[in-house]
Image (spheres, rainbow, N blue to C red):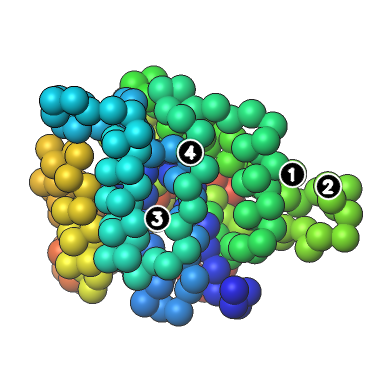
Amino acid sequence: MDQGKTALVVSAHAADFVWRAGGAIALHQQMGYNVTVVCLSYGERGESAKLWKQQGMTLERVREARRAEAESAAAALGVSDIRFFDLGDYPLDLGRAAQERLVDVIREVQPRWMMSHSLWDPYNTDHMNTTRFVLECRMIAQAWGHKPGQKVLGAPQLYLFEPHQTEQMQWKPDVFLDITPVWEKKRAAIECMQGQEHLWNFYTNVAENRANHFRRNSGGQAGGRAARYAEGFQSMFPRTVDEL
């Protein structure tokens, strides 16, 4: 893997990365990044209601369907490196073995930035537990005494992507990203998620609303940059910049 431009997105369930960060993923792939997506689970138990309503459905068939959807969505976004940990869901099994596995991935990828869920989500504890897990793995990946001889991680920013029912999640975006140039890729990825068709238009509307915030915060109504679709993120750590 080219270590020059890399990023890592950790998704609790197989569809989360599409709704919440598909634009950022596609845009950075287009900019020359190698974006790795890790899906901790397929969302087979708690996020596949449409599939479970089908006669004779089994857990294995749901897993296969959600994996195929996620692989198709990743391809639509330009991602070739998507990894499935298959940790189960509702709840995720985030034990020591999973921790070791993600730390190895983080050190392998050496991401310039990372993304995961909001810190608080009482509606779906898989989401907030994932981010605590990611923070812990990021910390371990920075430790010189963990598997001495491996290249340690630097200090990549962790961006928290937008949760569902945002107002309840204590999530406050401080970064807006214009994803208009890659919107068709994100919409194509969204439509790969046949198991959650009820969210297609919801997340299209979210992107339109965030574009309004992008325009407003890029210079106001008189001088803001045009944007039709955008994504919002909350940065976990202070950012160092050379120009505001």
Residue 231: give x, y in percent of width and height.
30, 55
Query: Which secondary structure, mark 3?
Result: strand
The type of residue carrying mark 4 is: Asp
- Report the side of 142 relative to 54 (left or right): right
**Residue 80 — which label?**
none
Is mark 1 in CB contact (under 8 Å) with mark 2?
Answer: yes
- Report the side of 135 relative to 162 (left or right): right
Name the residue that disc number 3 marks: 175
Is the residue marked by circle 1 packed among few (<14), some (14-19), or many (20+) residues within 10 Å? many
Is the residue marked by circle 4 packed among few (<14), some (14-19), or many (20+) residues within 10 Å? some
The type of residue carrying mark 2 is: His
Cα–Cα gap, marks 3 and 1: 26 Å
Q: Is residue 178 above or below residue 162?
A: below
**Residue 146 — which label?**
2
Name the residue that disc number 4 marks: 86
The mark closer to the camera, 4 or 2, is 4
Cα–Cα gap, marks 3 and 2: 32 Å
**23 or 72: nearer the eye?**
72
Residue 34: give x, y in percent of width and height.
49, 71
> Residue at 62% of width from left, 46% of height from top?
102
Name which of mark 4 and mark 1 comes first in the sequence.
Answer: 4
Cα–Cα gap, marks 4 and 2: 24 Å
Q: Is residue 2 above or below residue 43?
A: below
Name the residue that disc number 1 marks: 140
Cα–Cα gap, marks 1 and 2: 7 Å
Which part of the image, by quadrant, shows the N terminus?
bottom right
The type of residue carrying mark 1 is: Ile
